[in-house]
Image (spheres, rainbow, N blue to C red):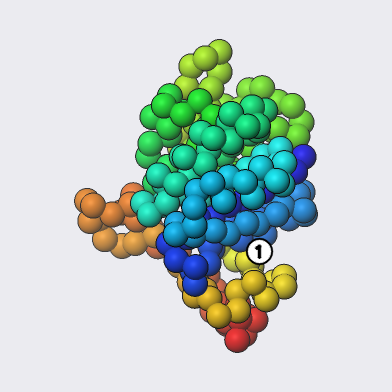
Amino acid sequence: MKIVLVSINAKYIHSGLAIRYLASYCAGDFPHIELKEFHINEPVETIIAEIYRLRPTVVGFSCYIWNIEYVLKVVDTLGQLLPDLVVILGGPEASFSGEELLVQHPAVSYVIAGEGEEAFRALLQALTAGKEDLGYIPGLYWRKNGEVRCNGGYQEIQDLDTIPSPYVKELDDLEHKLVYLETSRGCPYRCSYCLSSISRQVRFFSLDRVKADMKRLI
């Protein structure tokens, strides 16, 4: 199973943290996940052609407000070019539109809501094992017998240090780019317009973990 994770960033100098988290969290079971980064100023045809060239079995997209239109254009075309391709969407712009995305875009296979590390790994394991009942995977939108199912109850990782660092492998591709360093998840406030308000608690990476990541990046 060839797995490719795609981040379509807002600018060339940006980097995608989410796909690096997913790859590092799944590395024990799926060590050969390939990461591809693009930006929204590239022609959408270029992105489609590059992904098509890789011939993935599974492709995952990290979806945000600045790239969702590009992602859906890419996905819809890939669905025609590679009809057996498994397409997984996640991220804040997909998390709360899972049913809509599956209904309106047949090429989308699954949507993962909320923090994606555990659900993404569980889904890859299920696909590898050929499991058909995916009702146990938290936060997953999927299809069964032509109907869209929502598992609900997505999980938040309590001990963030259990997530392997996304910055342990070769970092040359990050040179001269903006790099994101996450020190906590969640928010103590309840702003109605912000997706972070859905979390009921703030969780922190340990100071040792944060320092170690900073040293690697430096």
Please tell me in which quadrant of the rendered image residue 87 appears: top right
Residues 3 and 95: in front is 3
Q: Decide: is 58 above or below 18.
A: above
Q: Give percent across and percent down for residue 43.
A: 49, 52
**Which residue is at a point 72% across and 47% down the rendered structure image?**
54
**Which residue is at a point 54% across and 58% down the rendered structure image?**
38
**Which residue is at a point 41% across and 46% down the rendered structure image?**
68
Q: Give percent across and percent down for residue 125.
A: 71, 38
SS category of the residue bearing label 1: loop
Looking at the figure, which quarter contains the N terminus? top right
**Which residue is at a point 54% across and 29% down the rendered structure image?**
107
To which residue does mark 1 refer?
A: 164
Specify whether residue 89 is in view.
no
Q: Give percent across and percent down for residue 50.
A: 64, 50
Q: Amino acid at mark 1?
A: Pro
Q: Number of numbered discs present?
A: 1
